[in-house]
Image: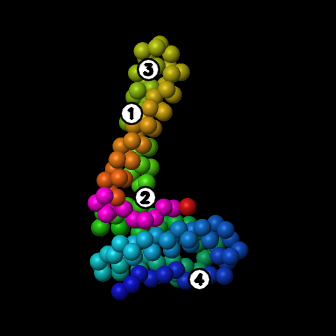
């Protein structure tokens, strides 16, 4: 059974935010279909897309609904199939690097120099460490064929 597609709406041409959300969700579905997935996962994704297609609220709420659907699909695909989008780990480790490496290093610099204004020195170091770890994990996912050919706009 193929994946469902988003039903066209006349307001997409008028609303650039809705057009962007529609494009992101549509390209995600295409990327998942290219990788292939079991029927159980396809049926769950189709249920999510049916919910979006049956939504009859105003455009701002539809955009929010599409974002929630995209998040749910990405979470499902990651948990069930181990597939992630491009730069997934890089973005994840950017935040983790700042929190786990940057702030403690900043505190060490601030305490060692006797001025807590140097707390900010650790953040760029944490960003660099996080990006390096995330890039390595993204490269590993690509080598294993666990990376979707998709990035959000």
Residue at the disc numbered 4: 8
Residue at the disc numbered 2: 86
Q: Nearer the viewer, mark 1 or mark 2?
A: 2
Crowdedness near tag 1: few (<14), some (14–19) or many (≥20) residues, C-alpha within 10 Å: many
Q: CA distance from mark 3 to mark 2?
A: 34 Å
- The colour scheme used here is rainbow
- Pointer 1 and pointer 2: residues touching (CB < 8 Å)? no
Q: Earlier in the sequence, mark 3 or mark 4?
A: 4
Q: CA distance from mark 3 to mark 1?
A: 12 Å
Residue 101's disc is 1
Q: Earlier in the sequence, mark 1 or mark 2?
A: 2
Q: Which residues are magenta?
A: 143-152
Image vertical order of residue 51 relative to residue 126, above or below: below
Q: Earlier in the sequence, mark 4 or mark 2?
A: 4
Q: CA distance from mark 1 to mark 2?
A: 24 Å
Residue in the picture at 52% in, 80% down: 6
Q: CA distance from mark 3 to mark 4?
A: 55 Å
């Amino acid at each position: 059974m193929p994946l469902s597609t988003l039903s066209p709406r006349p307001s997409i041409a008028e609303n650039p935010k809705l057009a962007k959300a529609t494009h992101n969700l549509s390209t995600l579905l295409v990327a998942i279909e290219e990788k292939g997935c079991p029927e159980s996962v396809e049926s769950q994704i189709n249920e999510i897309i049916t919910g979006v297609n049956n939504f009859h609220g105003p455009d701002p709420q539809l955009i929010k609904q599409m974002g929630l659907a995209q998040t749910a699909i990405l979470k499902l695909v990651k948990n069930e199939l181990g597939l992630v989008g491009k730069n997934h780990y890089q973005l994840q480790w950017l935040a983790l690097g700042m929190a786990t490496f940057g702030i403690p290093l900043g505190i060490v610099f601030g305490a060692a120099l006797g001025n807590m204004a140097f707390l900010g020195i650790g953040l760029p170091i944490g960003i660099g460490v996080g990006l390096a770890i995330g890039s390595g994990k993204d490269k590993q996912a690509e080598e294993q064929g666990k990376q979707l050919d998709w990035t959000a706009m």
